[in-house]
Image (spheres, grey):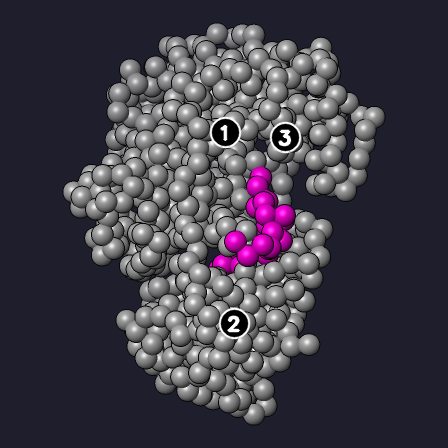
Amino acid sequence: MIGVDVGGTFTDVVAVRDGQLTVTKVPSDAAQPAAAVIEGARRIGVEGSAVFNHASTMGLNAVITRRLPKVAFLTTEGHRDILDRGTLRRPLDGQTDPSWRRPFGDAARPLVPRYLRRGIVERTLADGSELRALDEAQARRQLAVLRRCAVEGVAICLLNAYVDATHERRLRELVHEELGADVAVSISSETSPLAKEYARASTTVVDVFMKLIFGRYSAQLDEELRALGFAGDLHFADCAATLLPWREALEKPFRIVFAGPAAGTISSTRLGAALGTGNLLCADVGGTSTDVSLVVDGAPFVNNTFEIEHDVVINALSTEVSSVGAGGGSIVSISPSGDIRVGPESAGADPGPACYGRGGEQPTLTDACLLMGILDPGGFAGGEMALDPELARRAFAALDTPLSFEQRVAFAYRIAVANIAEEVMNVAVRHGVDPRDFSLVAYGAAGPMLLPAALELLHVARVIVPPQPGLFSAMGLLSTDLVHYESRSAYVLLMPDAAADVEERYKEMEQALRARVDANGATIRRSLDGRLLGQSWETPFVEVGDGAITAETMPALVERFHDAYERRYGNRFPYVPVQGVTYRVELVVGADKLEYAEVAAAPDPEPAGTLELRYLDDEPLQASVYDRDALGLGATIRGPAIVREPLSTTVVMPGQTAAVGRFGEIVIEAQP
Amino acid sequence: VHTFPRPQEPHLSVEREPVDGACPECGAQALAAYRVLGEGGLWDVVKCQQCLASVTRERAPRLGSLTPLGLTIR
């Protein structure tokens, strides 16, 4: 089994063979994204592997940076500005700012420029009947303009097409006739046949972008992996880190636009299950940002939509991940009011932190950790990169502030820790959970050197540093199932007389899934998104159960909705009728998963040396240094201490105790 | 006091000045310069009259052709 997580800075490759874990890290190449994956595959060897599971934030980065192919958008005449309008929500900081503009609007950076958004004369009503026939001559005139503009793809989203797709399907035929058979086309009635035209439109637009971005990439990747001797299955992870065969993923590639961060949550869930703890706050501290997610009772918090950026909505099942701009590369600067600020800007991989010696002159969190003694100047990134403390010192010395040098470094570290702790607390509060009942999983290369310091701010039960924290997200790709799903929308009051109608919808979707997937041994899961009558938002993932929906079982289904509503919002309104909106079938095909190897007992660890830990206190602290590979089950370390491993460094703060568990995980708790 | 005759055209629209050159998006020789009102205020644009791609887009005076008297007094 091989898992590959393509990040903005590094591509992580993890392989498991005969229970042995092999890992490698390759610098990512934005210009040739497949090259880093192939290089990683070559290093680790793919011959004989059964699966190659791939996750990438390449699509997300393309949307955020607007490095996008030229795509057109066709919609019902008079509605072409729905892409510009969004949901009309303004973020908090835009509500009192008259100059605020939507970042995807025409005045800023539109996903599709206005001249490529064309209205088509047609109209289908909400009940599926035709008010106005599709004007094919007018459509061909619009397509002639698009042909002259040499668009590479076309997204089609007509009003109410989720009820009747006749016009969209005909329009797709016209696109191929006018623009050629090889033009990528996505129609909303197939991409995301759900109510609410804006979310459907933005999902369809992103889908056609992903078809173009991943289309060439996937074919190249598959071909080059075969050339390296790989004879197994290439899978892509989706936004909930479940897997899809790559050709199926490319049929609806909007599902894989945001695949990286969810894999870390899955990995945490898997580790939590092995450790017997299901309540986890997961924090992935990378180079630019920290991604925080929540696992309650062993289940990640999954949503039915997510936003790529403010108001750019995607109708995909996705693990809820919140981000804060604090990571190893976060730049330390002085705010206009004179205080130290960390992030959200990042030095990234190029030029990187000042201590990399690649021309970066601004101090970063990595520079602070180097000056504090946490990072080893000669052992960074597995010894592949030497860090220069003098460059870090100069960068901090150059800050325009009356603060002393010691304060600059100490405050930078503490502010970064506080920023991350604040986001973790926000996630906990938003979901109404008490952090004291939760363990904080610290991963990402920078997680173990920052998050133990957050223990006293957050009052979580413990911090768990998993094995291989720098590659923990990639390991999540070896801990997940293949999930195929279909969903449909229809506003139906969940009353006994609607049972046959709802059951019929589920049967149709199940038949469609079974027709395209070999369902032997697969599990079918039915769920629905419903709402109280009169609401405009849905409560997602109400379990429907296994049996057929009948007039007799309908009251039980409504009761399950009320249970789900109460779990999510804390209130129960049993006398308000319930309306079904989206009906979903998931077909889960079990896959082989990573098993954590148990480590041998070694209760008395010997430190490899000591070092001076600076700026944590008024005076430097003497800290023991341990080699993580030498730590076994039962090893206990009292802080202050440093635990080094090739791709990460763990800090045990003064007043904390670290104990090594049976899978080599380090569990850090406050000393009683 | 200025007086203006009643317009004879059924619809009023801003005048579009033809501009030499080809549209970089569709290649048509149909560029025109005029003022538009969009999100963010008034803009002086050069747009292709066939595909409506904006070739240039520069911010126009905040109040368009109107110059308040106060701004003219020195």
- Residue A395 lies in what quarter of the image? bottom left
A366 and A398: which is toward the camera: A366
Rate crowding at label 1 as few (under 14), some (14 to 19) or many (20 or more) other CA atoms within 10 Å.
few
Q: Which residues are magenta?
A: A274-303
The residue singled out by tag 3 in the image is: A543
**Mark 1 and mark 3, same subunit?**
yes
| Cα distance in 3D space between marks 2 and 1 | 39 Å
Q: Amino acid at mark 3?
A: Glu
In magenta stretch: residue A603: no
Circle 3 — which element?
strand
Percent position of residue A41, x then y: 25, 51
Residue A177 appears anywhere in the view: yes
Circle 2 — which element?
loop
Q: Amino acid at mark 1?
A: Thr
A545 and A371: which is toward the camera: A545
| Cα distance in 3D space between marks 2 and 3 | 42 Å
Mark identifier at residue A523: 1
Percent position of residue A40, x then y: 26, 54
Mark identifier at residue A355: none
Q: Nearer the viewer, mark 2 or mark 3?
A: 2
| Extreme-right residue of the structure | A575
Q: Amino acid at mark 2?
A: Gly
- Residue A179 lies in what quarter of the image? top left
Q: Chain of mark 3?
A: A
Mark 2 or mark 3: whose residue is earlier in sequence: 3
Percent position of residue A223, x then y: 20, 39
> In the figure, A639 relative to A463: above or below?
below
Q: Nearer the viewer, mark 1 or mark 3?
A: 1
The residue singled out by tag 2 in the image is: A634
A615 sits to left or right of A359: right
